[in-house]
Amino acid sequence: MTDIPVLSVRNLVVEIPTRHAVLRPVDQVSFDIARGEILGVVGESGAGKSMTGSAVIGLLDRPARIASGEVYLNGQRIDNLSQAQMRKIRGRGIGMVFQDPLTSLNPLLTVGEQLIETMCEHLDISKADARTRAIRALEEVGIPAADHRIDSYPHAFSGGMRQRVVIALALCAQPALIIADEPTTALDVSVQAQIISLLKRLCRERGTAVMLVTHDMGVIAETADRVAVMYAGRTAELGPVREVLSRPRHPYTEGLMASTPQASLGQHRLRQIPGNMPRLGALPDGCAFHPRCTKGQDVCQRNPGPTLAADAGRSACWFPVTHPKTVEEEV
Amino acid sequence: MSENPALVSVRNMTRRFDVSKPWLNRLIERLPKRILTAVSDVSFDIPERQTYALVGESGSGKSTIGKMMVGLLAPSEGAVTINGIDLSRETSAQAMDAARAQIQMVFQDPYASLNPRWRVGKIITEPVAARGGDVTGLAARLLEQVGLSADVADKFPHEFSGGQRQRICIARALSSQPKFIVCDEPTSALDVSVQAQVLNLMSDLKTDLGLTFLFISHDLTVVRHMADRIGVLYLGRLVEEAAPDDLFQNPLHPYTRMLLDAAPKLDGFGREAPPPVGEIPDPINPPIGCAYNPRCPLVQDICRQQRPELRSIGKGRVACHLA
């Protein structure tokens, strides 16, 4: 039981057929998330990180579809389930926290009604029980005077409070996995720190696995146990967060770290990665990063980097950046 | 700081917005008028060729200040003077026009701030064309200056990525050869690698053209990177002002300290700091005394009764009783 990861994604490929070509926003992505683990998925816009999350929870918008690959939740394959079966998994098996807390709550129902509905749908409990539990859930996420606020509508809450309600909603049916898609991007730094710390605490207490999708390397560093760096639909680098961020092996990760301003470094010229992320319709042959890479060689133009397996391997690069010492050796 | 005269100076700037319900509702429901004070009593100077940064969370009034600096909003009280010309009180149209030509603005969202029906060349030269200036060859020169190729002048904005659009916005801001540019969150809609390109471009332009910037941002690390002086805003008031090194190494106001602690750090692996408490209070009914007192860990009785004045400490200014 303990050996089976909560979520296993194997060689996931998402395709969008268009008139001109078939686009691949997610290409051969594999990873595992263990119980109680937080996997950070980081990348710039268009890297395929949100699309991976949507594919896992079965919420891909047509015409996007899973073309190949497998998704397992607690050892059970879920990518080939019907919509009706998937509905049972959503909420009970996988909870979801979206970026914008206002649009992920129903404005016409009180937060209590939404929590109670979710719990009654997935758990075998009475409405009265569900209400007690809903109040407890709101207290747990730090909403003051929860027994009064439960009858308020979402518009009566501030942005940070709304995101707390969304987290309570995602956790109320006790799912094994939470997919948090940019949960703090719309929030101020002080509120972001509150929400991140809340998410960490609740997941640690319950052993919930988390897939944290974000573009913020700082949030990843402080929150995630492991990190997957995505570029143009593929995993560029996968490994323990400390390793990947302080000793990046893929030139893209290295560039990303160097272009992030850091307060501790004072004023220096930022290193910039030349160019832009390629559009999906115009991906270069070979490694998608090679036109922007300083170390690009012939092989990079012909072959995409080695595909990353879920457990082994660090970077999908033919010429990984080498560092004098790895973190383990240093410790 | 003293060797350069102030190009822009802001004196006791206050801006109130009337957010009352319509008068009939007020009459029937016997409601009082509701006034939101977005900015109150803010004063600072920006010397020539320097970057002054304003940081704060949402609702702190930073964008309102930006709009008043370029004359898009008039201050309720106080004044903005640019090269000695008071933007809201100057009566000579000629002097006003000259002052306005020296100010430009770069907005946050490069998708919303470019006219989708105009070609890039026309967008960029508009500030000059509107004053009847000569625009031959101008678009090509500006595009190259911001790192785009000259032949994109015939394209439409939708053909560009976010970073390229922000470069176009910067090119437009440069076209009338301004001295002073207000940048309202210029990189917060951009990805990090693109943000680095735009920030580097802005520092280059500052050095090459001798520009003066007001840089508005919520991101302290970006601000640290760009600014010569930083002002921290909370609920419409300046709570601390200092040089970047001083502010980051020795923040004097508890709010600044909280902001610095709360910002995620790239080397903060597994950091378990207790998160800040509370949220920004309602700006219509701000707390009595220091606006930060309900969230402040050091709060004392005096903070709940008296509003601290902004006073000089060392090389900076702080509004805290306990600093």
Image (tube, grey):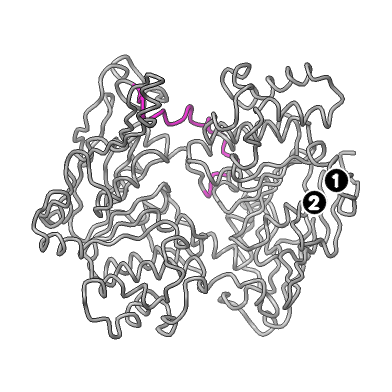
Marking on residue B97: none
Q: Secondary structure at mark 1?
A: helix
In this rendered view, identify the residue nearer to me: A216 or A323: A216
Q: CA distance from mark 2 to mark 1?
A: 7 Å
Q: Which amino acid type is shown beneath numbered disc 2?
A: Gly
Numbered circle sitting on residue A86: 1
Position in image of residue A326 (x %, y %): 64, 57
Q: Image quarter for residue A322? A: bottom right
Q: Position of residue B275 (x, y in %)?
A: 52, 31
Residue found at x 90% / y 50%: A81
Q: Which residues are magenta?
A: B266-287
Q: Disc 1 marks which amino acid?
A: Met
Q: Is residue B293 left or right of residue A36?
A: left
Work out whether residue A3 or residue B138 is closer to the camera in this orientation and state it: B138
Q: Chain of mark 2?
A: A
Pointers 2 and 1 in contact (C-beta within 8 Å): yes
Vertical placement of B156 versus B217: above or below?
A: below
User: Residue A4, percent across and down?
Assistant: 87, 44
Q: Are marks 2 and 1 on the same chain?
A: yes
- Residue at mark 2: A58
At 60% across and 40% down in the image, what residue appears?
A101
Chain where mark 1 sits: A
Say if the magenta span includes residue A295: no
Decide: few, some or many residues near mark 2? Use Cα within 10 Å; few <14, some 14-19, many ≥20.
many
Instruction: Name the main secondary structure of what is drawn in magenta.
Output: loop
Residue A273 at x, y percent in the picture: 51, 69
Task: Report which quarter residue B239 is drawn in.
Answer: top left
Is disc 2 placed on a helix, strand or loop? loop
> Which of marks 1 and 2 precedes in the sequence?
2
Are there few (<14), some (14-19), or many (20+) residues within 10 Å of tag 1?
some
Relative vertical location of residue B252 with respect to residue A238 in this rendering, above or below? above
